[in-house]
Amino acid sequence: MDMRKLVGRNFARLRAESGWSQEKVAERANVSQQYISDLENGKRNPTIETLYAIAQAFGVSHVELVKPDGQDD
């Protein structure tokens, strides 16, 4: 399982559910928009601190970003 892709898919799902732009998430999580784009596209390997900050921005547990989604990589 490619964890970067899994986190990216979970992030994209949460962002779609919230209706937020990448810019809004970046601002709320205190990271750059480019970082958010790379994360969503599975190109970043986020730290635990970054996962936590992004989860907090969405108001969910950090577990939501790493839980299996049933897709194989």
Image (spheres, rainbow, N blue to C red):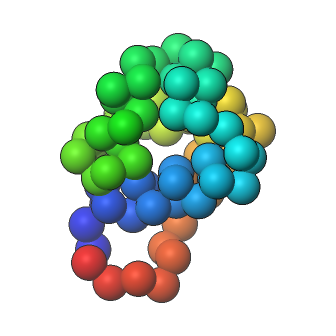
Q: Nearer the viewer, residue 21 or 30?
A: 21
Does residue 68 lie above or below 59 as drawn? Answer: below
Above or below 65: residue 71: below
Task: Give the residue at x 40% y 48%.
Answer: 40
> Where does residue 14 sit, x and y in percent of width and height?
64, 53
> Is 32 left, or right, of 28 in this rendering?
left
| Residue 49 seen in the figure | no
Closest to the observer: 16 or 5?
A: 16
Horizontal and vertical percent position of residue 50: 45, 29
Residue 42, position in %: x, y? 29, 52
* Residue 51 visible, this orientation: yes
Left or right of 30, for residue 34: left
- 25 vs 32: above or below: below
In the displayed structure image, the side of residue 19 where residue 63 appears, left or right: left
Residue positioned 48% across, 84% down in the render: 70
Residue 2: x and y in percent read 25, 66
Most foreground residue, 30 or 3: 30
- Residue drawn at x 52%, y 33% is 22
